[in-house]
Image (cartoon, grey):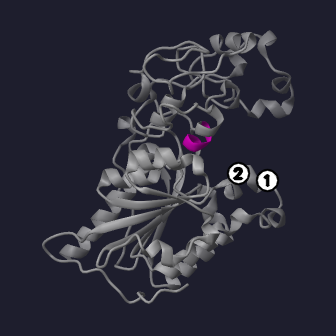
Amino acid sequence: MTTNNKLRRPTIRKKQLPKVAGVDLFCGVGGLTHGLLKAGIKIRAGIDLDTSCKYAYEVNNKAEFIEADITEITGERINKYWKQDEVKILVGCAPCQPFSTHANKLKDEEKEQGDKWNLLNEFIRLVRETTPDIISMENVTNLSNKQVFQDFVFQLQKLKYNVKYQNVYCPDYGIPQKRRRLVLLASRLGEIELIPPTHKKEKYKTVREAISHLEPIESGEISHNDKLHFTTKLTDINLRRIRASIPNGTWEDWDKNLLLECHKRESGKTYKAVYGRMSWDEPSPTITTQFYNYGTGRFGHPEQDRALTIREASILQSFPPKYKFVDKKQEVLLTRIGTHIGNAVPVNLGLAIGKSILKHLTEIKNG
């Protein structure tokens, strides 16, 4: 359904910034929403198909969670969350599996049959139906090379949006994690771009700064102070492996009797980060949905003989230390929360996006 507000422009008075409000597509547990909230941008609703995200999204962000398939959401429904004369912001991070490095090992024709390739087309459909003033989209860097993304940009430009996008190294924006992401900003009000990096290399936030204050725990132990600060118990052989590991080292540091069969094959020699320890004094590796599994990456604690906890991983994703992922009465499902955290937009990247939007509006006001 197409609305009749395509020619509407918010009133931007010289003396003050206009009121700003947003809706977050594919909101998950609220990483992007929370970052925008920290910047001073109110997000009224988030949309996601995964109902298990509802508690965390609503309790931390005071916004409504809409459980829905994006293909079934109409612009008319989204428009109800914006008031007259507000700057309307539509943001989102479509699930990235179709554009990941792993997915790209598949044949193009096989990938294109997947429904998730269509999510950007649904995003642009909702842009047409709601005509937001400002749009932001975050995703994996590899997406920028795909035709579906170039079509997305072309459609935005056709709708008279000024579009800028770039690949971002997360430590440049105060995120203690070596994650790389694609960030797109688009505006109907004028040229818009991401703010410059806020942190130089020598000031990158490190693992030590982020999580060293947390209570030490052992493999299989749970904190008395935080039920999300716990780890699964390592097997005896994995306990021996992590004890033989050094920060930023590889399995090549181990005795031969600790090696896995895959390490002995030529093909296994390229996967040197698995079963590794992080380093205290640099940002962490990219936090994936399997961060709690010592064998899936460099997810060993820098000095404690265990993998990362939920709380540690969430902080490395720049979620606040007290961000609530489950109700006190709820069971903590490690795989579910691991997926929520690994798939989230880092909060401080959302903060940078929010600051970029407000800077853009300030420049228009003063122009």
Spot the residue most to the left: 15
Tell me the residue at 30%/74% (across/down).
86
Tell me the residue at 43%/41% (across/down).
175
Is residue 290 visible to the viewer in this orientation of the structure? no
Q: Position of residue 27 (x, y in %)?
A: 51, 55
The reply to whether callout 1 and callout 2 are in contact (CB within 8 Å) is: yes
Q: Position of residue 63 (x, y in %)?
A: 40, 55
Q: Is residue 231 left or right of residue 84?
A: right
Q: Position of residue 1 (x, y in %)?
A: 55, 84
Q: Depth check: give the residue in front, 203 or 232.
A: 232
Per the image, label 2 sits on a secondary structure element best described as: loop
Quarter-of-image position of residue 6? bottom left
Magenta-drawn stretch contains 341: yes
The label shown at residue 204 is none
Q: Quadrant of the C terminus?
A: bottom left
Magenta-drawn stretch contains 324: no
Q: Is residue 206 left or right of residue 125?
A: left
Per the image, label 1 sits on a secondary structure element best described as: helix
* 103 lies above or below 286: below
Residue corresponding to mark 1 = 105
Amino acid type of the residue tagged 1 in the rendering: Lys
* 85 lies above or below 301: below
- Mark 1: give few (<14), some (14-19) or many (20+) Cα within 10 Å: few
Q: What segment carries the magenta color?
A: 338-342
Tell me the residue at 43%/16% (across/down).
215
Tell me the residue at 39%/61% (across/down).
44
Main SS category, magenta section: helix
Q: Position of residue 314 (x, y in %)?
A: 49, 36
Residue corresponding to mark 2 = 101
Q: Is residue 161 left or right of residue 83?
A: right
Q: Is residue 239 left or right of residue 108?
A: left
Spot the residue most to the front: 329
